[in-house]
Amino acid sequence: DDAPPAVPGSGGRRQRCASAAARLVNFGPTQRYPGELVFSLAWALLSLGITAWVSVSMINPIVMRKPRRYNATLGALGVVALFLATYVMHIGIGAFLWTRRYRQTKDTDYYAAWSAARGRADLRDWHSVQHFVIVTAYKEPLDTLKT
């Protein structure tokens, strides 16, 4: 069997350790805290509420026909707040979609998927793919990085 050895803490899945640094890191699955989904949804609803409030605050002065200076100032502030709220909502939605995608693919056995597709001509050998992570550490001693 040319399968890579199982790594402790990986749930019995076979993974290939690329280097000594990969063997030093032995992380188990990440634990989710209770209420994570509720907090994410509450944050998204709060962002949506702020966006709606900013939209109403921009329209109201224009309809009331206050002096132009007031309209221009409040309109400019409303546009800035709308962009900020959109940015925050974009981050919240992106985090929500990423956690959903992670939850769907975290238990995928990639070695089994590779074994099932082994006959394809465009498929590389399992051992020819080398993954690595670059950790930037400015002037940190090697002993500090290993701990």
Image (cartoon, grey):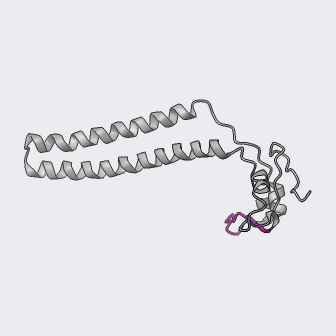
Indicate the position of residue 85 as horizontal and vertical percent values: 36, 46
Quarter of the image for the N terminus: give it. Answer: bottom right
Query: In which quadrant of the rendered view does residue 119 lie?
Result: bottom right
* Looking at the image, residue 37 lies above or below residue 118: above
Along the horizontal axis of the image, is 63 left or right of 55?
A: left
- The reply to whether the magenta stretch includes residue 94 is no
Q: Quadrant of residue 5?
A: bottom right
Kindly identify the residue that appears in the image at 40 percent across and 36 percent down. Answer: 46
Residue 26 is situated, as x and y percent measured from the top left of the image, at 80, 50
Q: Is residue 2 left or right of residue 97?
A: right
Relative image position of residue 6 (x, y in whole percent): 86, 50
Q: Nearer the viewer, residue 91 or 67?
A: 91
Instruction: Write the start and end of the magenta stretch as one range.
Output: 128-139
The one nearer the camera, 91 or 10, is: 10
Q: Residue at x 85, y 50 (%)?
A: 7
Residue 50 placed where, x, y %? Answer: 33, 39
Q: Is residue 92 above or below residue 117?
A: above
